[in-house]
Image (spheres, helix red, strand yellow):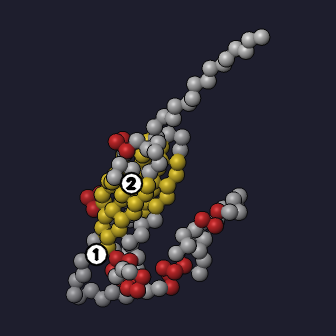
Amino acid sequence: MSIVRRSNVFDPLAGLWADPFDAFRSIVPPAIAGGNSETAAFASARVDWKETPEAHVFKADLPGVKKEEVKVEVEDGNVLVVSGERTKEKEDKNDKWHRVERSSGKFVRRFRLPEDAKVEEVKAGLENGVLTVTVPKAQVKKPEVKAIEISG
């Protein structure tokens, strides 16, 4: 069991920022951890958040989820909310299942956006099972420097 999600040879501290509760989730049954077994596996959709000079970009892997099943909202002026539901596959009583590993159920993720986020210009797209949400950044006004001549 490992807490580290991604390792980066060039950054020895990269593994220190892993989710401290990840190990807990893997050993505690979903019913005890506060969810039911049907939704627990999909409840925490994994999201990457990167910042570029122009925007904050969020990417979530949502395989098998249709555009109509995903909602992207901004709450309270600065909280990005990504939510949705992957529906369970219809079962035929004549089918014999040998293994069920793909999860289904509802998911929701919330991110507090920084002050420079232009929440009125958020864009989202879903392509090949990857949701990309782009939140443009406001231009930071650089302080104007005025040279003062020294007399004397």
User: Which numbered dot is residue 75?
Assistant: none
Which residue occupies the foreground of this view, 66 or 17?
Answer: 17
The residue at which mark 1 appears reads as 88
User: Which numbered dot is residue 79?
Assistant: 2
Q: Quadrant of residue 81?
A: bottom left
Residue farthest toward the right in the current orientation of the protein: 152
Residue 42, percent across and down?
Answer: 38, 72
Residue at 26% from the left image edge and 58% from the top image edge = 68
- Judge whether 14 appears above or below 89 on screen: above
Residue 116 visible in the snapshot: yes
Residue 100, percent across and down?
Answer: 37, 82
Indicate the amino acid at tag 1: Lys
Q: CA distance from mark 2 to mark 1?
A: 29 Å
Residue at 31% from the left image edge and 64% from the top image edge = 84
Left of 113 or right of it: where is 77? Answer: left
In the picture, the quarter occupied by the C terminus is top right
Residue at 28% from the left image edge and 75% from the top image edge = 88
Give the mark nearer the N terminus: 2 vs 1.
2
Residue 11, percent across and down?
Answer: 69, 59
- Judge whether 104 appears above or below 52 on screen: below
Indicate the amino acid at tag 2: Val
Which residue occupies the foreground of this view, 116 or 151?
Answer: 151
Mark 1 Cα shell of 10 Å, populated few (<14), some (14-19), many (≥20): few
Residue 120, percent across and down?
Answer: 34, 42
